[in-house]
Image (cartoon, coloured by chain):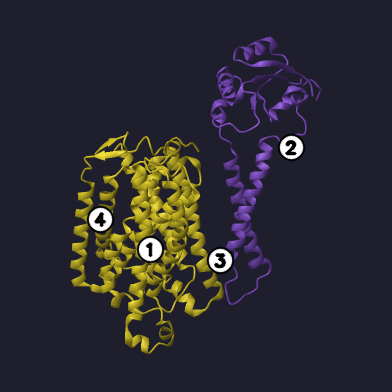
Chain colours: A yellow, B purple
């Protein structure tokens, strides 16, 4: 691909999009074949992949909203990447369709005979019922799509010389942030927490959000470093920006652990069976090692790797940490979803991989189509130059 | 010990504005002076690089002290709950470390915070109520509109050489300050 550093655009976008589409198509086709072999496994693998990639879109939307609300300068060069990550969310609504077909296999509370014999689920049926679940999911995606698209469109308009862009985007971001917080929380309750309909944790939505934000920050670092390798934006996104991304990665590594521990701590202390069952399942058999992997791999290792200044400015190391954190984010979601299916231990399936490829390929294809079609940074932003020359 | 330690001499010169001070700092650095400082009413971007300052070792000190705090607190909670007062509370094991995570975390943050403050003061050699530069009449303007470079030298060094050097890089009102 050829990069024009005057207009910040690329010509001959290269084969990235096609490759992503091929990977996505192959992944979805293989997963579809898996459906006929083991439909339950297919749905759970697919839900994991869906929730993983959706969390990146959600994280990208949060980053964009936050960027406008705080009036950040350093992240202007990353804003277009974040905006484009957020506009993948409407595509995720289409990719949600297989989950709808799998609701009977995924969600226990959809079984009428189970609910009829279960006092707790009867009480919850006002919230946990199929029509309301579907309406809610559509509402979440509508909120995310409206704010994602509007911010994206305004940003593109700014490229064309719209001077009042920043102010209007900030005004839009304030209500956006409130609706974002509510919709993300309930989305996590619906898609993940209701896998075990008896169990509940009020902080669960924040936990999903924390993991997603850490995931998307890793994605920004890895994707920007990929562009850098192709000599795209190499002079625009400098080591100073990677340093800042590294600081956020460090901060949100701790934030994720803080929220995860807060959830665990109260349940462990109170020791009420209906609450402890969640962690009991995740301490059974080989799940115990996945739990330990999260503590050491998702917290301790990135914490020690990112605490000093040098690793954040060492781009090869930062790329490694970014990839590692993305893998850990997947492990985290796998750990939330799969114990519902495999109670007694980890059981990895090839469908876990193909579903990730399938959903991820479509995600990356759409992301790349939008990203490569426009300027790679918001070139109309009056503070773009200040952002490029930022020094820590 | 005899009182043979000689008082250092300070050379003070004024420069035009933050830009002038930044240029002067680079020249003083390039001339090989190590013991010099810049004084301005407000922080100037890029001054650290211009003066050739190294990164502070404070981060490493804070890291080590914070982890000493963390491990001390782990040891304390272990000793209290297992050795000194082994009480079974709500049927949990004696060393129920999840319960101690908040105080361990808090002590880690507290040790880190206190070390940051005290370490910063110690590395800056603060508090220091008096400095020979305060004897200069014009130096008080460093808090309002004056931009100064001060060079610290042993009294054995050639005064005229440093004075003429400061004048040559554009310094005005070059002063020599001795004594307490």
Taking the image as shown, residue A367 lies to the left or right of residue B17, namely: left
Whole-Å distance between the Cαs marked 4 and 2? 60 Å
Q: Quadrant of residue B19?
A: top right
Q: Residue at x 47, y 42 (%)?
A: A73
Question: Residue B90 at x, y = what percent?
Answer: 60, 77
Q: Which mark is residue A243?
A: none
Nearer to us in this view, A37 or A195: A195
Which quadrant of the figure contains the N terminus of chain A?
top left
Crowding around mark 2 (Cα neighbors within 10 Å: few <14, some 14 to 19, many 20+) is few
Crowding around mark 4 (Cα neighbors within 10 Å: few <14, some 14 to 19, many 20+) is many
Question: Residue B159 at x, y = what percent?
Answer: 70, 12
> Residues at badges 3 and 2 in contact (C-beta under 8 Å)?
no
The residue identified by callout 4 is A361
The residue identified by callout 3 is B98
Nearer to us in this view, A168 or A251: A168
Taking the image as shown, residue A379 lies to the left or right of residue B135, namely: left
Nearer the camera: disc 3 or disc 2 = 2
SS of the residue under disc 2: loop
The residue identified by callout 1 is A143
Taking the image as shown, residue A75 lies to the left or right of residue B36, namely: left
Q: Are marks 2 and 1 on the same chain?
A: no
Q: Are marks 3 and 2 on the same chain?
A: yes
Closer to the chain start, of discs 4 and 1, is 1
Is residue A292 in view? no
Closer to the chain start, of discs 3 and 2, is 3
Whole-Å distance between the Cαs marked 2 and 1? 55 Å
Q: Chain of mark 4?
A: A
Whole-Å distance between the Cαs marked 4 and 1? 24 Å
Q: Residue at x 25, y 55 (%)?
A: A361
Taking the image as shown, residue B19 lies to the left or right of residue A318, namely: right
């Amino acid at each position: 691909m050829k990069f024009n550093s005057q207009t910040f655009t690329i010509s001959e976008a290269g084969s990235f999009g096609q490759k992503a589409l091929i990977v996505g198509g192959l992944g979805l086709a293989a997963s579809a074949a898996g459906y006929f072999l083991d439909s339950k496994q297919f749905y759970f693998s697919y839900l994991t992949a869906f929730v993983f990639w959706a969390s990146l879109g959600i994280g990208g939307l949060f980053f964009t909203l936050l960027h406008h609300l705080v009036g950040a300068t350093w992240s202007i060069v990353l804003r277009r990447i974040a905006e484009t990550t957020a506009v993948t969310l409407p595509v995720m609504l289409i990719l949600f369709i297989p989950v709808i077909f799998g609701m009977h296999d995924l969600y226990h509370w959809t079984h009428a005979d189970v609910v009829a014999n279960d006092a707790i689920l009867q009480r919850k049926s006002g919230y946990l019922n199929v029509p309301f679940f579907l309406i809610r999911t559509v509402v979440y995606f509508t909120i995310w799509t409206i704010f994602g698209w509007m911010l994206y469109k305004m940003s593109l308009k700014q490229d064309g010389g719209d001077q009042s862009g920043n102010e209007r985007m900030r005004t839009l971001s304030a209500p956006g942030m409130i609706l974002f917080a509510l919709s993300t929380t309930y989305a996590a309750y619906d898609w993940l927490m209701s896998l075990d309909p008896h169990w509940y944790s009020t902080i669960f939505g924040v936990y999903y959000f924390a993991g997603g934000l850490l995931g998307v920050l890793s994605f920004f670092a890895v994707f920007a470093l990929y562009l850098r390798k192709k000599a795209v934006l190499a002079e625009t996104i400098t080591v100073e920006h990677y340093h800042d991304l590294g600081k956020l990665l460090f901060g949100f590594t701790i934030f994720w652990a803080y929220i995860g521990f807060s959830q665990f701590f109260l349940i462990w202390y109170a020791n009420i069976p209906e609450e402890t069952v969640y962690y009991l399942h995740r301490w059974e058999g080989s799940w115990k090692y996945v739990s330990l992997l999260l503590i050491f791999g998702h917290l301790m290792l990135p914490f020690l790797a990112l605490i000093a200044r040098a690793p954040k400015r060492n781009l090869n190391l930062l790329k490694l940490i970014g990839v590692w954190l993305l893998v850990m984010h997947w492990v985290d979601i796998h750990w939330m979803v799969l114990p519902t299916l495999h109670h007694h231990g980890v059981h990895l399936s090839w469908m876990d991989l193909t579903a990730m490829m399938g959903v991820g390929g479509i995600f990356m294809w759409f992301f790349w189509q939008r990203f490569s079609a426009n300027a790679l940074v918001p070139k109309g932003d009056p503070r773009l130059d200040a952002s490029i020359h930022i020094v820590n | 010990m005899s009182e043979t330690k000689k008082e250092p001499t300070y050379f003070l010169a004024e420069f035009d504005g933050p830009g002038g001070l930044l240029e002067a700092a680079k020249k003083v650095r390039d001339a090989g002076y190590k013991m010099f400082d810049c004084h301005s009413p407000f922080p100037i971007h890029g001054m650290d690089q211009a003066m050739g300052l190294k990164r502070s070792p404070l981060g490493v000190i804070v890291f080590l002290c914070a982890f000493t705090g963390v491990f001390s607190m782990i040891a304390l909670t272990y000793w209290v709950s297992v050795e000194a007062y082994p009480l079974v509370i709500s049927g949990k094991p004696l060393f129920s470390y999840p319960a101690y995570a908040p105080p361990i975390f808090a002590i880690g943050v507290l040790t880190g915070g206190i070390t940051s403050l005290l370490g910063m003061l110690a590395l800056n050699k603060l508090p220091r109520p008096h400095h020979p530069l305060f004897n200069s009449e014009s130096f008080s303007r460093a808090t309002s509109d004056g931009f100064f470079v001060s060079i610290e030298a042993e009294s054995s060094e050639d005064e005229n050489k440093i004075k003429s050097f400061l004048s040559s890089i554009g310094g005005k009102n070059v002063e020599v300050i001795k004594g307490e």
